[in-house]
Amino acid sequence: MKIEDLSLFLTKVSLFKGLNSEEIANCLTKTDFEIKNYKKNETVFFRGDALKKVIIIIGGTAHGEMQKFNGDTIIINQMKSGEVLASAFLFGKDNIFPVDLVTLENSKFLFFSKEKYLNLIQTDKRLLLNFINEISNRSQHLSKRIWFNFTHKTIEEKILSYIKENSENGKIKFLPSISALAKRFEVTRPALSREISNLCKRNILTKGENGIYLINSTNLIEKNI
């Protein structure tokens, strides 16, 4: 990827918000950046691996997962192109990956030195503020996840909360898949599919094409979600 194309892409990434492509290109020349390609279902990092670089997904998707003692896998979160990986773990006492990171499709990751990135953010207030916002948003997201797991007891409540947080234009797609979402909810796939079917029967959802469901907002509001 040419530095011009990469710089234009990074104008939409949180760490570079407010900078134009020329300014970002100048930043990249000071960070010794590199791009690595990964195949679908490849484990890029394991939990406990040292985090020595600033890492941004610039193509494809990935998710974080953890293994339970019984061998089951829990999906922690899904990350798409443009997201920064483990930003809250870049600095501080334990600079390690908190989960295994697995690609969901052929993907590209951008790497650059966190030491040189630290030098950059000390010279530009916009970069510093962007980084503070990035780690704050991650912390808030984690807090919401903890609250979600403690307060939503039933599968239906988890589905409805997921719909509220992830719907767009009256539509929802259960990503990355029903099976992966079931692991995230710590329920079985048949149980999750059954509850989604029940929501369709009650006209809260209408199944469309390509795994997309239409949301009946009136009936959803009646659920006080």
Image (cartoon, rainbow, N blue to C red):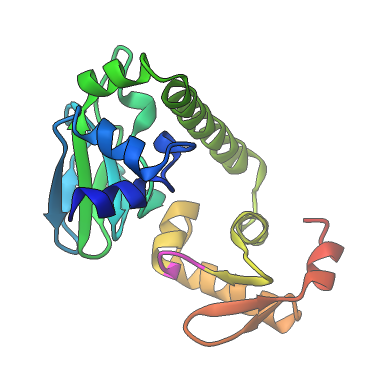
- Identity of the residue drawn at 26% across and 33% down: 26
Q: For residue 176: magenta?
A: yes
Taking the spot 44% from the left edge, 48% from the top edge, the residue there is 12
- The part of the image, by quadrant, that contains residue 196 is bottom right
Question: Which residue sits furthest bottom?
Answer: 209
Residue numbers of the magenta segment: 174-178
Determine whether 200 is above or below 120 in the image: below
The image position of residue 83, as x and y in percent, is 38, 46
Task: Give the farthest residue toward the front.
Answer: 22
As drawn, is 8 to the left or to the right of 34? right
> In this view of the protein, can residue 71 be seen by the observer?
no
Q: Nearer the viewer, residue 132 or 209?
A: 132
Secondary structure mostly seen in the magenta stretch: loop
* For residue 100, side relative to residue 174 (left or right): left
Observer-nearest of 7 and 132: 7
Expressed as whole percent of the image width and height from the top left, the position of residue 178 reads 45, 69
Residue in front for this viewpoint, 166 or 153: 166
**Can residue 52 be seen in the rendering of this structure?**
yes
User: Does residue 50 appear left or right of residue 16 in this picture?
Assistant: left
Vertical arrangement, residue 8 with respect to residue 172, above or below: above
- State the image coordinates of residue 20 (x, y, percent, origin top left): 41, 41
126 in the magenta segment: no
Give the percent coordinates (x, y) of residue 60: 29, 60
